[in-house]
Amino acid sequence: MFVRELQTGLLACPFETSVKTGSYWLTWLKSRRVTPAMQLFRDWALDEAAREAAGQSDGVS
């Protein structure tokens, strides 16, 4: 995710060291109620990951 944005400078990596794991984790406290905004972000992130895996992602949309 975000490869194009990093390459074009739209996003910057804040650290010199990077670790490629092939996995992403989205977490929140169990004690926190999931808000509509959190659900919307989760759905978007899952959709982008699926599009990237299928070779269809054109970056952040």
Image (cartoon, rainbow, N blue to C red):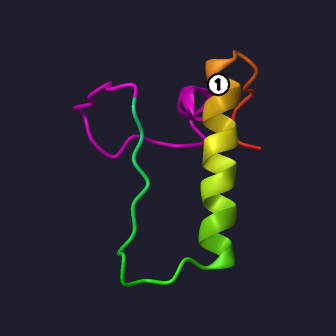
Q: Quadrant of residue 10?
A: top right
Image quarter hosting the C terminus: top right
Q: Up-down: is 7 above or below 15?
A: above
In the rendered image, residue 7, in percent from the top left (x then y), is placed at 56, 26
In the rendered image, residue 28, in percent from the top left (x then y), is placed at 39, 69
Image quarter hosting the N terminus: top right
Residue 15 included in the magenta stretch of the image: yes
Q: Residues within 10 Å of mark 1 (few under 14, many from 20)?
A: some
Q: On the image, numbered disc 1 is attached to which residue?
A: 52
24 left or right, relative to 7: left
Q: Report the amino acid beneath label 1.
A: Glu
Q: Name the foreground residue: 12 vs 26.
A: 26
25 left or right, relative to 39: left
At x 35% / y 75%, what residue is drawn? 29
Q: Name the foreground residue: 16 vs 60.
A: 60
At x 43% / y 83%, what residue is drawn? 32
Q: Up-down: is 44 above or below 41?
A: above
Q: Quadrant of residue 13?
A: top left
- Residue lying farthest to the front in this orientation: 30
Disc 1 on helix, strand or loop? helix
In the rendered image, residue 3, in percent from the top left (x then y), is placed at 56, 27
**Number of marks in the rendered image:** 1
Write down the region rendered in magenta.
Answer: 1-22
Q: Main secondary structure of the magenta part?
A: loop
Q: Up-down: is 46 above or below 17?
A: below
- Residue lying farthest to the top in this orientation: 55
Residue 46 included in the magenta stretch of the image: no
Q: Name the foreground residue: 51 vs 6.
A: 51
Q: Up-down: is 43 above or below 9?
A: below
At x 27% / y 41%, what residue is drawn? 15
In the rendered image, residue 44, in percent from the top left (x then y), is placed at 69, 50
